[in-house]
């Protein structure tokens, strides 16, 4: 049985057969303690304090031309109705509103895609579309598997004015106004060092057959953050959903990819449709590993920030000072969080200040 929508796309017969053959099955945190040691390719200092695996996809000359007109994109994030998801969405939406109309921004409308199947108490605060979750038990506790299914439903039912969509997540904060980084048929994406298609060829060939080309055609990305043309996402989303389900249904792949399974699924689905992404390392920063804001656009606070009172990172150990979103699973963090001790990087200080500003200005912050 397959969750499949009747959406056309320029995929070959092989792709159609592959997608129809996929059966049901489902980003959270990827542990990144001392992650630089795991890289098999050179690490490049981006001059803003961050260290990155450096996959290079050259932007085609045809899309390097400057653009005159604005190309607004719709901001879309999938979410649950759990308190943990709600407070992050409220902070994210606060900073979207702050940055949206500033110079350099090409942000358009905003939608929280709520895949709980029922409205919640944020419907009047955040523009929201309610979609259905996967059938009971299908995600096997891997809640992120609902994300591609949510996008399939939303794209089918929503009237989206913009030609582009930013796929975002609740734990994103717009630290500077975000322009449209995509160029026509070339979406823009952030390269993740731990998405390594070339090192997982055996597994990926189960979903990306040799006839489709080398596994290096699969970009080292997840679905978020990605800015992509709406019509391209309409083609990719059903494939992304079915590849996710198929990967979850394969024990070997499920074990190997774990919490990044759905990210690999998006990367594979895009490659199956022949879509290549422009990799933008400036799209996002991830404290505490990225030290400075620089010219980045989004803070992604997925990792815990733990420091001693000397301002030294404690590397996986709970610090005397800490900020970790997982410390607030059952409800929102309190207002006016204490700032980090002296010596803590700019990225972490900025993150806490931005969280504090949002919580100070969002009404009824303590409500779940």
Image (tube, rainbow, N blue to C red):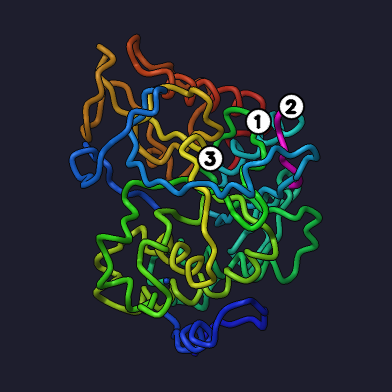
Q: Secondary structure at mark 2?
A: loop
Label drawn at residue 88 = none
What segment is highlighted magenta in the picture? 102-109
Q: Please say whether residue 83 is visible from this viewpoint.
A: no
In magenta stretch: residue 106: yes
Residue of label 2: 102
Q: CA distance from mark 2 to mark 3?
A: 18 Å
Q: Position of residue 8 (x, y in %)?
A: 67, 79
- Taking the spot 53% from the left edge, 74% from the top edge, the residue there is 239
Q: Which residue shows up at 35% across the image and 78% down it?
A: 210
The residue that mark 3 highlights is 172
Mark 1 burial class by Cα count in 10 Å: few <14, some 14-19, many 20+: many
- Seen in the picture, residue 279 relative to 148 is either above or below; the reply is above
Pointer 1: what residue? Answer: 177
Q: Is residue 83 magenta?
A: no
Residue at position x 25%, y 68% in the image: 255
Tell which tag, 2 or 3, sits nearer the viewer: 2
Q: CA distance from mark 1 to mark 2?
A: 6 Å
* SS assignment at label 3: strand
Tell me, yes or no, whether the two marked residues, 1 and 2, touch with CB atoms within 8 Å: yes
Residue 166 seen anywhere in this rendered image of the structure: yes
Left/right placement of residue 68 relative to residue 200 reads right
Task: For the residues labelled 2 and 3, say whether their Cβ atoms are less than 8 Å apart.
Answer: no
Q: Are marks 3 and 1 in contact (CB under 8 Å)?
A: no
């Amino acid at each position: 049985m397959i969750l499949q929508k009747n959406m056309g796309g320029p995929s070959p017969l092989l792709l159609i057969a592959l997608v129809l053959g996929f059966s049901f099955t489902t980003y959270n945190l990827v542990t990144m303690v001392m992650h630089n040691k795991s890289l098999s390719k050179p690490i490049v200092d981006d001059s803003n304090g961050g260290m990155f695996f450096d996959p290079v996809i050259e932007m085609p000359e045809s899309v390097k031309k400057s653009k005159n007109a604005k190309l607004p994109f719709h901001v879309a994030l999938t979410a649950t109705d759990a308190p943990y998801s709600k407070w992050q969405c409220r902070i994210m939406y606060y900073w979207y509103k702050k940055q949206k109309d500033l110079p350099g921004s090409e942000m358009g409308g905003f939608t929280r895609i709520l895949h709980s199947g029922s409205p919640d108490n944020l419907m009047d605060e955040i523009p929201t579309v309610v979609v259905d979750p996967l059938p009971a038990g299908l995600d096997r506790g891997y809640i992120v598997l609902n994300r591609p299914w949510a996008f399939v439903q939303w794209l089918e039912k929503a009237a989206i004015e913009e030609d582009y969509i930013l796929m975002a997540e609740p734990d994103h904060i717009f630290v500077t106004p975000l322009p449209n980084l995509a160029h026509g048929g070339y979406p823009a994406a952030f390269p993740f060092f731990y998405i390594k298609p070339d090192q997982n060829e055996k597994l990926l060939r189960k979903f990306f057959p040799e006839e489709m080309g080398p596994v290096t055609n699969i970009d080292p990305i997840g679905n978020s953050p990605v800015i992509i043309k709406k019509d391209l996402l309409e083609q990719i989303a059903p494939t992304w959903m079915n590849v996710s389900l198929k990967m979850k249904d394969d024990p070997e792949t499920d074990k190997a990819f774990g919490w990044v399974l759905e990210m690999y699924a998006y990367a594979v689905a895009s490659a199956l449709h022949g879509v290549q992404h422009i990799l933008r390392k400036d799209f996002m920063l991830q404290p505490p590993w990225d030290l400075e804001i620089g010219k980045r656009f989004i803070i992604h606070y997925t990792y815990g920030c733990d420091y001693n009172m000397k301002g030294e990172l404690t590397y996986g150990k709970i610090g005397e000072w800490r900020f970790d979103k997982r410390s607030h699973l059952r409800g929102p963090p309190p207002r006016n969080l204490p700032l980090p001790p002296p010596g803590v990087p700019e990225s972490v200080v900025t993150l806490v200040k931005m969280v504090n500003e949002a919580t100070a200005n969002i009404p009824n912050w303590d409500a779940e």
